[in-house]
Image (cartoon, grey):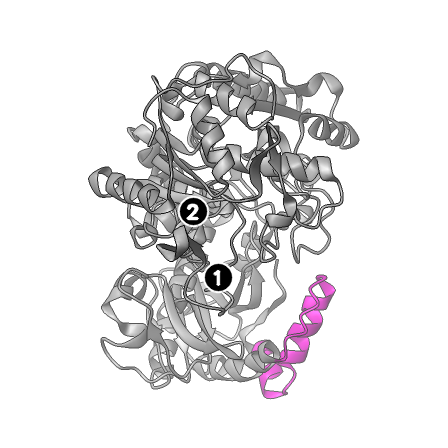
Amino acid sequence: MLVYHASKENFQEDVLGGKIADIVKEKLLEHGINDQNPAEFNAWTNSLMFMRMALENQAIPSEAEVAIEYQIPLTSKRVDFMIAGADDSGRDNVVIVELKQWTSADKVSDASPHTVRTFTGGALREVAHPCYQAYSYRSHIENYSQFAEERKVALSSVAYCHNYARTPGEGLLDPVYSLWLSEAPLFTKEENRALSEFIAKRIHKKSEDGEILYKIDHGKIRPAKALQDCLSSMVKGNKEFQLLDEQSVVYDKIMEAFLRSCRDKKKRVLIVKGGPGTGKSVLAVNVLCDLINAKEGHGFHAAYLTKNSAPRKVYLKLLSKGDLKKEVAIEDLFRSPFGLHNLPDEFFDCLLVDEAHRLVKQMFRDYGGENQIKEAIHASLVSVFFLDETQRISVKDIGTAEGIKQAALEEGVEEENVLQGDSYCLRSEFRCNGSEDYLSFLNDLLGIEKTAHPYFDGEDFDFRIYDDACSLQKAIQEKERIGGKSRLVAGYCYDWNVKNNRGSIDILLDDGRFQACWNDPNKSSLFAIDPKQKDMVGCIHTVQGLEFDYVGVIIGRDLRYENGAVITDPGQVSKDDKSSGIRSCKDKALADSLIRNTYKVLLTRGQKGCYVYCEDPSLREYLKTRIGRRLR
């Protein structure tokens, strides 16, 4: 979306006339963006004056295209400044400029190559490095603009911090940011002329048609060949994403339905059901990869979508294997449902909606959103919902098979094109050591459903009960030390003291002998793979959709054993829980179900074993009567 689009000459006149900030604000309003941030208004006034100075170079043609606050397709991100034209050889060029008014910035840590700490928005915050921002914007356009790819437009990206003094090796120029500095050079307050020369080398004359930015903005969105090759190389040979058993059968059903829609142009909605560990996410990633790489080098426009950020971030890390540029290249394939309502009908060829049971009507601050299920169906020719209704954990979760079907019918999908049933079910377990008996036992134990497995003998899966939280912690720490990928998790009964500046400990058990903190709220989505959080305790939102070798589960007092039955107590849920709504839920049956579902999710995160401590002694002893061996 082009907010402000003009020639260099007109841009300079608007700046000199003191009108530029008002014009940008007015244009945003015309596009339905009511930006009331005074700091941003002042930034337009100040930073664009410096850009005007950089463009005074006579070598930069007056007819060059200028864009301000260009909103990148598929995202809510806006590029501060772009200028387009042609170089001496006649090749079209676009220079992307990320503008900052910062006077100082500090490195966060050697383990945080994307992030800096600076004073912005009225406080000291950790935010993205401006060179990383500029590079990521360029990468997105390169990977998705059909016009830019076919026209072979050369894109460059820079960051211009016009109040920042260059100090080699420190702050923004610390070696930890070397990759982004090489991909998007940093220009500081002493370097306005250098920035001007950088632009002049690339924008030396008007482009052939003078509408590069307009055509990028209005052109087709599709994955570029470079993105296809990148994703294919990451998935190929990656054992984390190999299809097994009926995963491949359901894969074929999805592809068959998708190709039918390509032929007859009819919307189709697929509902793929599967319990914990049946490979829903692995299947979704494989379908995504193959759609992106299909069509003889001109891949389909597809995306993987989840409300929960943890699976998205972890799959990015697993696929990119530490290659930061590859991670940037594919990050837009892994999306949130935020802003779906802004997309036109069938914007995507296919949306793969993982953890569909977690969809809601409207996300916080997603103004205009009404129902994420309907919005996903509307935005895609084919939408595939991966679903497990027993993993709904919030009063806001609306993802059910019936709800998806009803939404599809309301969106005009023909009933015969809502595909579900046995052919679309995943049953084989690849978590919990493939033990279907364990999952059946959990459903019976938690009162989710009566099954033929009220007892568990521990033959196929290492399931243990611990009498104190310290012993549980030591066992999980030992598993993490030996082989990694083991974590402690807990029900949402404990306050977030550290996050809310109420103390240094969140979870205190065993008469004070057990002390732990919840996962890092600033990096919660990476809890599963972040070694710095290995001694912290994960909450439901950091682990749903993910898995470990061994998981240690602390069951709080919201699940107890009284009068011969396992009961729930919503009043024991922490007041700091702002997301589940369980504590204040007036529907007692729903609150009861959500607590049981939460513990089912936590108790099914382990591939090799699950170790448990129950804060309620009666529940602890009752659990022991339901299992056979490996008791502690």
Does residue 162 appear anywhere in the picture?
Answer: yes
Residue drawn where x is 53% and y is 76% of the image: 121
Gap in angstroms between the C-alphas marked 1 and 2: 39 Å
Disc 1: CA contacts within 10 A as few (<14), some (14-19) or many (>=20) = many
Point 46% across, 84% down: residue: 53
Residue 615, horizontal then vertical, whole percent: 47, 43
Residue at numbered disc 1: 207
Residue in the picture at 35% in, 43% down? 487
As displayed, is residue 511 above or below residue 104?
above
Label 1 or label 2, whichever lies nearer to me, is 2
Q: Which residue is mark 2?
A: 313
Pick the front one: 220 or 135: 135
Q: Is residue 277 in the magenta section?
A: no
Q: Which residues are magenta?
A: 10-38
Q: What x and y, as percent, mark residue 243?
A: 39, 21
Residue 535 image point, x, y percent: 33, 51
Q: Is residue 91 visible?
A: no
Earlier in the chain: of badge 1 and badge 2, it is: 1
Instruction: Determine crowd level at label 2: few under 14, some 14-19, many 20+ residues with C-alpha closer than 10 A.
Output: many
Residue ranking furthest to the left: 482
Give the x, y percent position of residue 98: 45, 69
